[in-house]
């Protein structure tokens, strides 16, 4: 049974283990050309899946057209033909710890003509009973995938024994990373130093004759002669004087900077004080204007000064009359008392 997807050009084959999708168009991979006898010599050729052959579901087969030739392939071979990566690198594990690289190379000498690159990592036996043994491993890159398959079928599971009698069965599997270190590039400037202009100038400078070196006495005489030529009016500044002068200049500069900062601070304080006084004056003027406006809105009452004086006179007369009456009552009481006695 098959389901064809026209948009993706995929063919789905139903098997007892599940559905398998294969491409209907593509190119035969190099692995399939080396491993499948029917595809030998068709590496890189375009293929086209025609139809499924009516066989049992346990062994499905596919009819394929490759380079105008019709072939009938098993489903596994068809999947191998669609591989896009050509695998040629394998990893050999479980190598005995005492097996050296030379001994391993001798054991794989029959494939030496097909081995393009080999890397060997020797193991390490346990130094004490509680330490595990580290087994060795090797990576091999073959020139052709068929040589890698042949090597795997012959070496996988084979017993290897080292010089101390440690035996283990090897495990061969495809490497996850199929890349290998590239060859070192040749330096294009190697061997060209003799023709370099700067190197030739350096050699000419070395070979040139140099004047003889002056003696210590001649150098001292030259210094004394230079010192004598100095005039008496010329001021000689010693390092100590230079230091003191520089120190004085730094102190003067610091003092000047402090005075400038102090003057700027005083000016800023004066500006703030003047600003505060201006704000207070503005506030007082605003308050006076508001008071005048409120006084204008209230009604004015007229007062007669003469009337006020008359009322005050009447009040004073009443007070004096009351005092006289009180004094008279007190005198009458005194006379009555004397008469009684």
Image (cartoon, grey):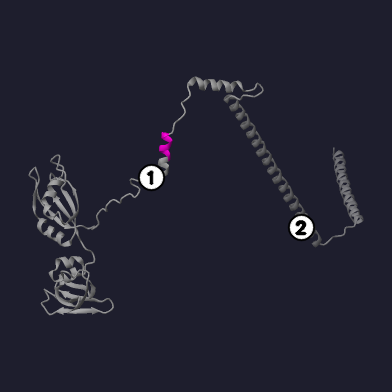
Q: Nearer the viewer, mark 1 or mark 2?
A: 1
Q: Main secondary structure of the magenta part?
A: helix
Classify residue 23 by image quadrant: bottom left
Classify residue 241 by image quadrant: top right
Start-end of magenta stretch: 201-207
The magenta stretch spans residue 202:
yes
Q: CA distance from mark 1 to mark 2?
A: 103 Å
x and y, in percent, of residue 52 in the image: 16, 78
Residue 179 falls left or right of residue 281: left
Mark 1 nearby-residue class (10 Å; few <14, some 14–19, many ≥20): few
260 up-or-down from 72: above or below: above
Question: Residue beneath label 2, please?
Answer: 290
Taking depth in this image into account, of 22 and 152 the one nearest to the observer is 152
Classify residue 3 by image quadrant: bottom left
x and y, in percent, of residue 128 in the image: 14, 39
x and y, in percent, of residue 12 in the image: 21, 76
140 up-or-down from 204: above or below: below
Taking depth in this image into account, of 213 and 68 the one nearest to the observer is 213
230 up-or-down from 179: above or below: above
70 up-or-down from 188: above or below: below
User: Taking the image as drawn, is residue 95 in sight?
Assistant: no
What residue is at 89 percent from the left and 54 percent from the top?
Answer: 308
Question: What kind of element bears circle 1?
Answer: helix
Q: Which mark is residue 195?
A: 1
Residue 276 falls left or right of residue 121: right
What residue is at 18 percent from the left and 65 percent from the top?
Answer: 31
Query: Of label 1 and label 2, which has the lower sequence position?
Result: 1
Q: Which mark is residue 136?
A: none
Taking depth in this image into account, of 52 and 43 the one nearest to the observer is 43
């Amino acid at each position: 049974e098959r389901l064809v997807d026209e948009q993706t050009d995929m063919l789905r084959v139903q098997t007892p283990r599940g559905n398998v999708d294969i491409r209907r168009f593509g190119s035969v991979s190099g692995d399939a050309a080396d491993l499948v006898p029917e595809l030998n010599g068709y590496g890189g050729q375009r293929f086209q899946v025609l139809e499924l052959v009516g066989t049992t579901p346990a062994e499905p087969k596919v009819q394929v057209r490759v380079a105008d030739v019709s072939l009938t392939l098993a489903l596994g071979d068809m999947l191998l033909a669609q591989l896009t990566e050509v695998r040629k690198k394998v990893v050999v594990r479980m190598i005995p710890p005492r097996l050296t690289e030379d001994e391993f190379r001798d054991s794989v000498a029959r494939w030496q003509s097909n081995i393009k690159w080999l890397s060997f990592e020797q193991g390490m036996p346990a130094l004490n009973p509680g330490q595990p043994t580290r087994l060795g491993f090797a990576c091999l890159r073959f020139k052709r995938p068929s040589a890698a398959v042949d090597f795997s079928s012959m070496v996988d599971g084979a017993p290897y024994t080292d010089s101390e009698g440690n035996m283990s069965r090897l495990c061969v599997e495809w490497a996850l990373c199929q890349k290998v270190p590239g060859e070192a590039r040749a330096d294009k400037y190697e061997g060209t130093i003799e023709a370099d202009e700067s190197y030739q100038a350096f050699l000419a400078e070395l070979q040139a004759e140099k004047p003889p070196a002056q003696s210590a006495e001649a150098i001292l005489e030259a210094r004394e002669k230079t010192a004598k030529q100095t005039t008496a009016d010329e001021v000689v500044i010693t390092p100590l004087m230079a230091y003191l002068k520089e120190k004085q200049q730094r102190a003067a500069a610091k003092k000047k900077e402090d005075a400038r900062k102090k003057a700027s601070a005083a000016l800023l304080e004066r500006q703030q004080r003047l600003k505060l006084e201006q704000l207070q004056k503005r506030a007082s003027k605003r308050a006076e204007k508001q008071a005048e406006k409120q006084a204008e809105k209230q009604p004015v009452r007229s007062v007669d000064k003469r009337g006020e004086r008359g009322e005050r006179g009447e009040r004073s007369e009443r007070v004096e009359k009351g005092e006289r009456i009180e004094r008279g009552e007190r005198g009458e009481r005194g006379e009555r008392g004397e008469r009684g006695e």
